[in-house]
Image (cartoon, grey):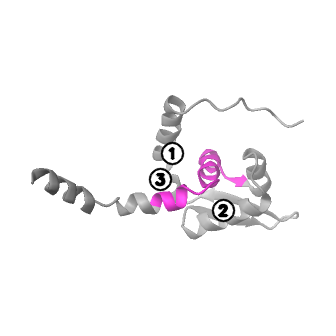
């Protein structure tokens, strides 16, 4: 009987709503690397594109719009000439810094090494 009650309690336990929401946003490919680059400093679109190997312009644009809609990234237009668009973290986005650094440290200790970075020629 005690085993049944333990099993029933486990069946009723649900994942935390906050964890679900954070990974729906940060679990999408590219969102973490974009935020990581912007933690260092604001960046122009072209700089972000160069800093994140493999991301297409379309995907970068879509992810920046999504992060902006979530209140994590602010898009700023520099009138120029030439007209340039830069991105920076909002206060809400900057508040992710400790968590992102912890995840990065965890990955260094617990995930297999990535191949070395090579600069395109």
Placement of 75 over or under 53, stated as above or below: below
**Residue 17, horizontal then vertical, whole percent:** 37, 63
Placement of 103 over or under 91, stated as above or below: above
Q: Real-space Cα distance between discs 1 and 3?
A: 10 Å
- Kindly identify which residue carries mark 1: 100
Residue at image point 74% right, 45% down:
51
First of labels 1, 3 by sequence position: 3
- Under circle 1, the secondary element is helix
Mark carried by residue 56: none
Residue at image point 74% right, 32% down:
117
Q: Marks 1 and 3: which is nearer the front?
A: 1
State which quadrant residue 72 falls in: bottom right
- Kindly identify which residue carries mark 2: 63
- Under circle 3, the secondary element is loop
User: Magenta span: helix, strand or loop, mainly?
Assistant: helix
- Kindly identify which residue carries mark 3: 95
Span highlighted in magenta in the image:
22-43
Q: Residue furthest right?
A: 121
Tell me the quarter of the image containing the N terminus: bottom left
User: Would residue 120 be found to the left or right of residue 95 on screen?
Assistant: right
Residue placed most toward the observer, 76 or 15: 15
- Under circle 2, the secondary element is helix
């Amino acid at each position: 009987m005690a085993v049944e009650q333990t099993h029933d309690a486990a069946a009723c336990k649900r994942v935390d709503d906050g964890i679900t929401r954070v990974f729906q946003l940060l679990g999408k490919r590219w969102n973490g690397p974009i935020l990581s680059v912007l933690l260092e400093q604001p960046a122009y679109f072209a700089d972000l594109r160069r800093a994140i190997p493999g991301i297409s312009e379309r995907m970068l644009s879509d992810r920046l719009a999504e992060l902006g809609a979530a209140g994590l990234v602010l898009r700023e237009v520099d009138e120029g000439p030439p007209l340039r668009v830069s991105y920076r973290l909002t206060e809400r986005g900057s508040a992710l810094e400790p968590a992102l650094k912890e995840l990065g440290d965890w990955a260094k200790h617990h995930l297999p090494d990535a191949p070395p970075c090579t600069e395109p020629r």
